[in-house]
Amino acid sequence: MRPTFLLLQTAFCLGLAGRAADEADAALAGSITEVVFAERRAEVRERLRALRGDYHALLSRASSGATRPIAPERLLRLRLDAARLVREATGLEAAAVGGRGYLAASGTARRLREAAFLPVQSPTEGHLEWELRRLRG
């Protein structure tokens, strides 16, 4: 798998997770359930921050024409972790928004559909896991 391809897919995942987290924050702001989801929101935000940092570091390295290639394991792990974060973030958004998020035309419903597709988007979650295990020997 090409680094540029994995980085592009990772960018999509991080953008989707970020938007879902923003929508969850907006839905929960000032609500009676804000405190209920505080820990979960903090975990999603922290993972998003960390993965964005990893992504930007790898993107910078890939864009700089570095002579040493990026370890495939780092790219595969980042792509897999970003896709898993999308599921967590969209689940949080759905819980925060409630039933109105399931209206077909809502942004929440669209993000849920996109998140549901990620495990089977090539490279699939199973393929990413297989590649990681193969690299570990």
Image: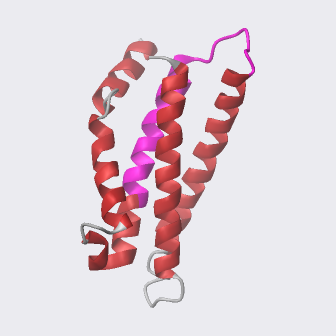
Query: For the point 56% across and 52% down, which residue is it?
Result: 48
Query: For the point 34% across and 50% down, which residue is it?
Result: 115
Q: Position of residue 18 (x, y in %)?
A: 53, 57
For the record, the magenta segment spans: 64-89
Q: Main secondary structure of the magenta part?
A: helix
Give the quadrant of the N terminus: top left
15 versus 8 height, above or below: below
Location of residue 126 (image quadrant): top left
Q: Position of residue 52 (x, y in %)?
A: 62, 45
15 versus 74 height, above or below: below
103 versus 114 height, above or below: below
Query: For the point 38% across and 60% down, which residue is it?
Result: 90
How many callouts does the rendering have? 0
Residue 67 colored in magenta in the image: yes
Closest to the observer: 43 or 128?
128
Q: Residue furthest front?
A: 105
